[in-house]
Amino acid sequence: MFIFTYRIIFVMPHRPYIRWLFNAMVITMTFCSSAASSREALVGVATNFVEAGEDLKLLFELESQHTVKLVTGATGALYAQIINGAPLDLLLAADQARPQRLVEQGFALGNSRFTYAMGTLTLWSTNPKLVGRNALDVLKAGTFRNLAIANPDLAPYGAAAREVLALLNLNESLKGKIVQGQNVGQTFSMVATGNAELGLVALSYVLSQRNKFSGVRWDVPSEFYHPIRQDGVLLSRGIDNPAARDFYAFLRSEQAKSIITRYGYGTE
């Protein structure tokens, strides 16, 4: 079709309306081709990974014809939305359990689950006198007012915090001082606003450029708790979406890993 139109214009250049028609056809063909190759991916992102996710989105959009829309929330809430029909293409969860469950229930591609980030737990305070080289001694002494952790039954970082306290035999002695946030973001806010003097929180929140609160931290040794593996999975709706497939592949690239590590996460 393209060659035939070109020949007409070449043979009859004195007919300007044919030239105009040809140009219009080229513009239309270009637009249609672009529309067919560029799509939007809807990606569910765990709250603790939002800032890193936004940087990943920006880089991906710069290097592709696709766009990405992030839908943020607690992993449990995103999981519930997906099984109730939410039109998400990918899920970047804060744990491994929900992505695995989605695979088992037929909501996600079986072999697409992978660990995109590994979280780091840190003891953080806005009071520089509370955390330092003797952070363990501070925890064991219990001379602080409150220690904030995320709800262990809902948040992976909370479960890791509970493991640390159990390992140090502090669950009972600190029982009256522990306060819980519903998620790690709320837990971080409790410390930032002074409602808790100390908190076992995600390192990503402390390193965030949006964190306007100065403070001190002690990164809990990784052997003190089970790895906080955050898994991603390609959902059934995203299988036929080129934007979703390309973003899924991009997340495993070295470029993506460099962004993820900048926010305090480990990668594999």
Image (tube, rainbow, N blue to C red):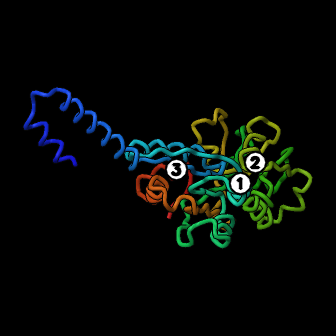
The quadrant holding residue 51 is: top right
> Residues at badges 1 and 3 in contact (C-beta under 8 Å)?
no
**Callout 3: SS:** strand
**Callout 2: SS:** strand
The answer to whether one can see residue 157 in this image is: no
Q: Earlier in the sequence, mark 1 or mark 3?
A: 3
User: Which sits in the foreground, 41 or 260?
Assistant: 41
Residue ID at (41%, 57%): 254
Of labels 3 and 2, the one closer to you: 3
The answer to whether one can see residue 74 in this image is: yes
**Callout 1: SS:** helix
Identity, as a three-letter code, of the amino acid under mark 3: Ala
Q: Is residue 15 above or below residue 158?
A: above
Q: Which mark is residue 81?
A: 1
Q: Position of residue 135 (x, y in %)?
A: 72, 52
Q: Which residue is mark 3?
A: 41
Q: Which residue is mark 2?
A: 199
